[in-house]
Amino acid sequence: MLTRVLVALVALVVAFAILGADNPPVIKKVSPVHTSPASGKDMFTNYCAVCHGKDGKGGGPAVSALKMQPPDLTTLTHRSNGKFPELRVYAAIHGDVEMPAHGSKDMPVWGTVFQSMDRDSGAQQMRVSNLTKYIQSIQAK
């Protein structure tokens, strides 16, 4: 049941990204694309870029459907006094913290989505960990 809700949330974001603001929204249910847990970049492209943009700066195609502009993920280190906030990023991806831009834990909660993709908890942790490492790799120098 929770997986269906998460898929519906992802579908809603994608629908807003595809449809213009002038057209009434049509929700198309889609399953998340299965990517390798080893590739943080592929996961970012498939799961995060719709809101955060391919470059991580917050300009994805679904931005107009969001309550607030997604943060520029390339400046997390700068905004955290020069230290990448690894645990905070990991917790945000996993769904352990509230995301005010999304009103609640509606980011969607990728930890739960990853759990539906991989029954192995090691693969789930690898996904969140490698996605966190990829976000760390795109920090502005």
Image: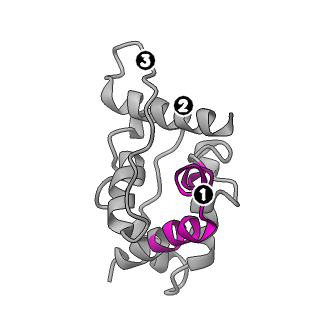
Q: Which mark is residue 25?
A: 3
Task: Give me the C-alpha separation between circle 1 and circle 3.
Answer: 33 Å
Circle 1: element type: loop
Q: Quadrant of residue 118?
A: bottom right
Q: Amino acid at mark 1?
A: Arg
Sooner in the amino-acid sequence: mark 1 or mark 2:
2
Circle 2: element type: helix
The relative height of residue 78 versus residue 53 in the rendered view (above or below) is: below
The residue at which mark 1 appears reads as 119
Q: Residue at x 54, y 31 (%)?
A: 8
Residue closest to the far bottom: 82
Q: Are marks 1 and 3 in contact (CB under 8 Å)?
A: no
Of residues 58 and 118, the one nearer the viewer is 118
Q: Quadrant of residue 139?
A: bottom left
Q: Which mark is residue 67?
A: none
Circle 3: element type: loop
The residue at which mark 2 appears reads as 8
Magenta stretch: dominant secondary structure: helix
Q: Amino acid at mark 3?
A: Pro
Q: Position of residue 132 (x, y in %)?
A: 49, 72
Q: Position of residue 93 (x, y in %)?
A: 57, 61
User: Can I make out residue 5 in this image?
Assistant: yes
Residue 87, magenta (yes or no): no
User: Can I make out residue 57 in this image?
Assistant: no
Q: Amino acid at mark 2?
A: Ala
In the rendered structure, the answer to whether residue 120 lies left or right of residue 19 reads right
Sooner in the amino-acid sequence: mark 1 or mark 3:
3
Task: Give me the C-alpha separation between circle 3 and circle 2.
Answer: 13 Å
Residue closest to the far top: 24
Q: Residues in magenta?
A: 109-130
Q: Residue at x 42, y 23 (%)?
A: 28
